Image (cartoon, rainbow, N blue to C red):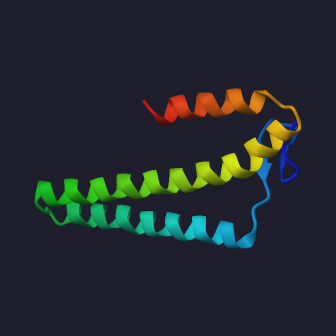
Amino acid sequence: MACEKCSANGDNVKHKQRESAEKKALLTRLSRIEGQVRGVRAMVEDDRYCVDIVTQVSAIQAALNGFNKELLARHIKTCVSEDIKEGNEQAVDELCELLKKLMK
């Protein structure tokens, strides 16, 4: 079972219908991160100082962590919550496995 906004097609790829505001916020974050990565590339091409590049890479990692936190919170509040209400215990197992991957 999956929440009413989630579905899987024949090739086991899951999909989730997101509200437009949620989708826009996530895409905005990703665009910002994409710009940061391009900036680091330009720094490398420009032979910038290592410490400056490492500092920017650290900022990218923080931005990616923020993206993951937001996405995970929304996932728990929607998909996982609805699956639990419907008696789908596998949603908890899936969440636990995801958390293990994130905490490596």
Q: Position of residue 57 (x, y in %)?
A: 29, 55
Q: Quadrant of residue 41?
A: bottom left
Q: Give the side of residue 65 with respect to residue 36, left or right.
A: right
Q: Give the side of residue 88 with respect to residue 38, left or right.
A: right
Q: Residue at x 88, y 50 (%)?
A: 4
Closer to the camera, 101 or 30?
A: 101
Q: Residue at x 88, y 36 (%)?
A: 1
As drawn, 11 above or below 97: below
Q: Position of residue 46 (x, y in %)?
A: 17, 66
Q: Give the side of residue 54 with respect to residue 25, left or right.
A: left
Q: Quadrant of residue 64?
A: bottom left
Q: Residue at x 71, y 31 (%)?
A: 92
Q: Position of residue 77 (x, y in %)?
A: 70, 51
- State which quarter of the image contains the C terminus: top left
Q: Residue at x 43, y 63 (%)?
A: 33
As drawn, 82 above or below 22: above
